[in-house]
Image: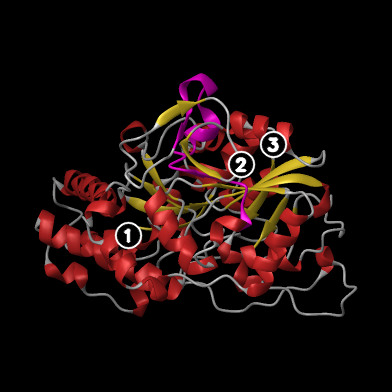
Amino acid sequence: MKLKDFSALCFDMDFTLVNYSLKNFLPMVYDVTAQFLVEKKGYPKSLQHRDEADLKLIRQGLLLDKKTHHIIDVTSSGDIISAHDGKRFLSDDKISAIYPDKRWPYFDSYYKRFECDAEYPSYNDTPYFFFDSSFVSPVIPLIFKHMQTLSSSDPDYGEKCLTFYKDMLESFGFNFNPENYKARKGLFFPEMIKNTDLYIKKASPKLKDRLKELRDKGTKLVVITASHVDYTELLMTYAYGSDWRNYFDVVCCRARKPGFFTSSPHSRPFYQWHDKDETVGMECIRELKSDETFLEGHWTLVDKWIKCYAEKPGRVAYVGDSFKSDIVPTKLFSSWDLFAIVLEGKKYLREEREAEFNHVNKKPHLAESEPEGWGSFFGSFEQRTMTAGKLIAHADITMSDIETLASLELDENFESGCFYDFDPY
């Protein structure tokens, strides 16, 4: 498989085309969530007090079991690696007492479904919540802080926990609802607008040159993001410059993934975007046009446009980071290849070697320590995590950063299923 063999590359935006500074972003998401819970829901102000120990508890790929009120890490075969009850990590004996044979009882149904057939969040339909992104994982220490204010012997303990989870979910709507950007509502978008430079990294000249090179050589480049046009404009302008649209052939916003991949094509038309107000001036269309912006839609219409206008025959790949919105649905519901972006890979970057080294066989280098208590996002070679299992099963190539695309030579062979610039095992 070679990069030059692709007739088109389609990109997610958040945490893919646009790199966030996690050292600033994760604490900010914690803060705006805590502020909502204190000011809107009446929780104690102690929730707003955080330290480094709290931030070390943040990790993607974990599950909240709404029956036991534990947060757990699960292997790709359904065994529980670790569990936290809100106050402490549980011993293996304690885990076995709660979960017979240390097995998560919902694994079989969950692993097969992986929530691809529902729009986010599918909270009420499942006995668990999946922390699949950096937009939601910062609430993990907040859940623990709340549990620490409760007594497990309280007959209303379970109900109080469930109420907190629902309030937590409401905070996501309050802060992350794309409609809030224009009205400057909530706490998240005003902060992102005010301090974009704190949370977003600028794309390197090398990456921008690579995108230009790909397009100049006939590869169609498409943006497919769940973000609305205004937020996309803010981030892409900061990261790539005011001429950012010149790097791409088509921009699709408000894609409402995973439905962009999982829904029926007939139920997901594209809308022509004419105005900065996304609630007016929209025209339902069935065919895309180059150098324009569209809303919503379905992957099959993008695929049809690529086949009609691609300057060269070849494969199509989608580049994304979210397990629920990008990685799993792309492979299960589309004919596209998948390039996965996994930021946790930065902890296992491969060492630099001579120019002719084999990327698949480079040695791992641990760049920073894992969060205390939680093991690796990837698990071990013998005991892979559920998310690592999905990566291995679905990703044609996994990279730690979109910047890696700039170092992947156009005619370089890469092995399908490989971790390109890092090795977690």
Which of pointers 2 and 1 lies earlier in the amino acid sequence?
Answer: 1
Query: In the rendered structure, which disc, 3 or 2, sits on the residue that comes first in sequence?
Result: 2
Disc ID at residue 290: 2
The 10 Å Cα crowd at callout 2, few under 14, some 14 to 19, many 20 or more, is few
2 relative to 405, above or below: above
Please, what is the three-letter code of the amino acid marked with disc 1? Val
Percent of width and height locating residue 264? 52, 22
- Circle 1 SS class: helix
What is the spatial separation of the Cα atoms under label 1 and label 3, in whole angstroms? 40 Å
Q: Which badge, 1 or 3, is on the more N-terminal residue?
A: 1
Tag of residue 306? 3
The answer for how far apart the CA atoms under marks 2 and 1 are is 40 Å
Kind of residue at badge 2: Ser
The residues tagged by marks 3 and 2 sit, at their Cα atoms, a distance apart of: 10 Å
261 up-or-down from 371: above or below: above
In the rendered picture of this protein, how many numbered marks are placed on residues? 3
| Disc 3 element | helix
**Residue at image point 83% right, 80% down:** 353
Asked whether residue 392 appears in the rendered view, the answer is: yes
Foreground: 197 or 339? 197
Q: Give the range drawn in magenta.
A: 247-272
Provide residue 315's location: percent of width, then percent of height.
77, 40
User: Is residue 255 rendered magenta in the image?
Assistant: yes
